[in-house]
């Protein structure tokens, strides 16, 4: 099984081999997200089904992924990487006192704007073992990033208290978004963003006063 483009391959229609592989990989990942984020979920995801939806043969699947579980993990990592990058960019572009809202706005709108993403990240019905593990990993990642951001913004030491607050915050935000997506809270996206941003600011301010 091959995991990298052959360096000796010649361009095809002006497109280098590595770029063609990257394009095929992106098509497969998008197809995987569509299947995982559907009502059928992980049970419907097979190598054959992914390739059929992406319009590619199985050999192209195995040039980038070893098996189904490796692929499911890659789909999740792909979604989280994009969400993390766009959120960090939104925060960096906002004034200090508006950064919490900018970050929450990007997260909420990105998730609400693509139901495939919301199902993958938050649906309790999607209980695939790889997805469950990846959700735990991503929560840890987001808590780490939040702790780093608060530490840098308020010039605080990144100690266990700050890490505990960050894990608490990420878990709470996740539960709130899950409940909102499930229709258990009659709030607009802007109302949810304002509320979550306010809570984040309060937690950060409380920690900075300690």
Image (cartoon, rainbow, N blue to C red):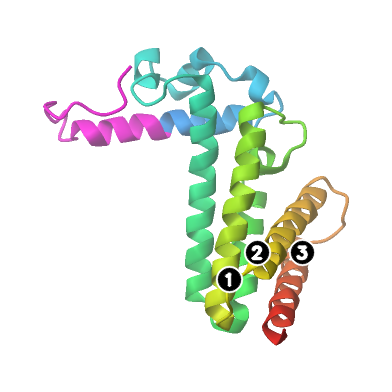
* Residue located beneath label 2 in the image: 163
Nearer to us of marks 2 and 3 is 2
Give the image location of residue 199, x and y in percent: 76, 72
- How crowded pointer 2 is (Cα within 10 Å; few <14, some 14-19, many 20+) is rated as some
Which portion, as a residue range, is magenta? 1-26
The image shows a total of numbered marks equal to 3
Hey, which quadrant is residue 36 in on the image? Answer: top right
Hey, which quadrant is residue 197 in on the image? Answer: bottom right
Residue situated furthest bottom in the rendering: 209
Residue for point 67% across, 51% down: 112
Q: Are marks 1 and 2 in contact (CB under 8 Å)?
A: yes
* Residue located beneath label 3 in the image: 192
Q: Is residue 12 above or below residue 198?
A: above
Q: Check if residue 13 falls in the magenta segment.
A: yes
Residue for point 66% across, 57% down: 108
* Residue located beneath label 1 in the image: 158
Q: Are marks 2 and 3 in contact (CB under 8 Å)?
A: no
Secondary structure under the numbered disc 3 in the rendered image: helix
Q: CA distance from mark 1 to mark 3?
A: 28 Å
Q: Which mark is residue 90?
A: none
Q: Is residue 48 above or below residue 158?
A: above
- How crowded pointer 1 is (Cα within 10 Å; few <14, some 14-19, many 20+) is rated as some
Mark closest to the chain's N terminus, 2 or 3:
2
């Amino acid at each position: 099984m091959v995991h990298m483009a052959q360096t000796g391959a010649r361009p095809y229609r002006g497109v280098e081999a590595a770029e063609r592989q990257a394009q095929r990989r992106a098509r497969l990942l998008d197809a995987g997200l569509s299947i995982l984020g559907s009502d059928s979920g992980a049970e419907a995801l097979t190598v054959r089904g992914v390739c059929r939806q992406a319009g590619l043969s199985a050999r192209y699947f195995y040039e980038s992924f070893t098996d189904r579980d490796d692929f499911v993990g890659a789909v999740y990592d792909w979604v989280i990487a994009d969400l993390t990058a766009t959120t960090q960019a939104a925060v960096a572009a906002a004034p200090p006192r508006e950064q919490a809202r900018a970050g929450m706005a990007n997260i909420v709108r990105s998730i609400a704007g693509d139901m495939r993403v919301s199902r993958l990240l938050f649906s309790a019905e999607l209980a695939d073992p790889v997805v469950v593990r990846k959700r735990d990993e991503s929560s840890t990642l987001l808590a780490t990033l939040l702790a780093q951001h608060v530490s840098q913004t308020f010039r605080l030491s990144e100690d266990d208290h700050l890490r505990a607050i960050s894990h608490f915050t990420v878990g709470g935000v996740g539960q709130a978004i899950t409940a909102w997506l499930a229709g258990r809270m009659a709030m607009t996206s802007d109302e949810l963003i304002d509320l979550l941003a306010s809570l984040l600011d309060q937690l950060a301010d409380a920690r900075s006063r300690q």
